[in-house]
Amino acid sequence: MTSFLSGKKDPLEEQTKYAEVKIGAYVAAHNEAFLKLDHLTEVLKDIFPDSEIAQGITLKRTKGKGIVINVLGKEHQEVLTAKLKK
């Protein structure tokens, strides 16, 4: 709550979001099923118990699909559109 009011971003939260986006990109790039994310996040938490980033990952199939479609997909669409306009 205090980081929201002060306008400062929590570095741990930012790193966790970055990790979730990278994992989503990996799943999309390798044509993996989003269902695998339900198990993968628990495996990462088990493998890296001392990592606050791994413990903070809440990426499951629904959120992973949303990241791929709404974040990565839109970004790639904008890049492709810009290239085609040149």
Image (cartoon, rainbow, N blue to C red):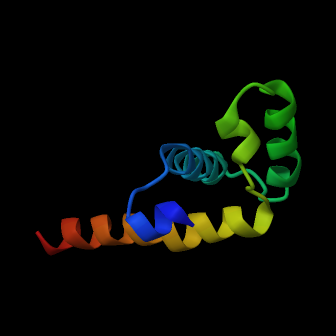
**Place of residue 7 in the rendered image (x, y in percent of width and height, measured from the top left):** 38, 65
- Give the image quarter of residue 42: top right
Total count of labels = 0
**Place of residue 40 in the rendered image (x, y in percent of width and height, measured from the top left):** 82, 43
- For the residue pair 51 and 18, the one nearer the viewer reads as 51
Residue located at (77% from left, 26% from top): 48
Quadrant housing the N terminus: bottom right
Is 39 situated left or right of 67 in this image? right
- Give the image quarter of residue 8: bottom left
Residue located at (78% from left, 56% from top): 33
Instruction: Establish if 79 lies above or below 12.
Output: below
- For the residue pair 19 and 61, the one nearer the viewer reads as 19
Instruction: Establish if 63 lies above or below 27.
Output: below
Residue located at (76% from left, 69% from top): 62
Residue 72 visible = no
- For the residue pair 61 and 18, the one nearer the viewer reads as 18
**Place of residue 77 in the rendered image (x, y in percent of width and height, measured from the top left):** 38, 71
Residue 58 visible = yes
Is 71 situated left or right of 58 in this image? left
Residue located at (59% from left, 65% from top): 67
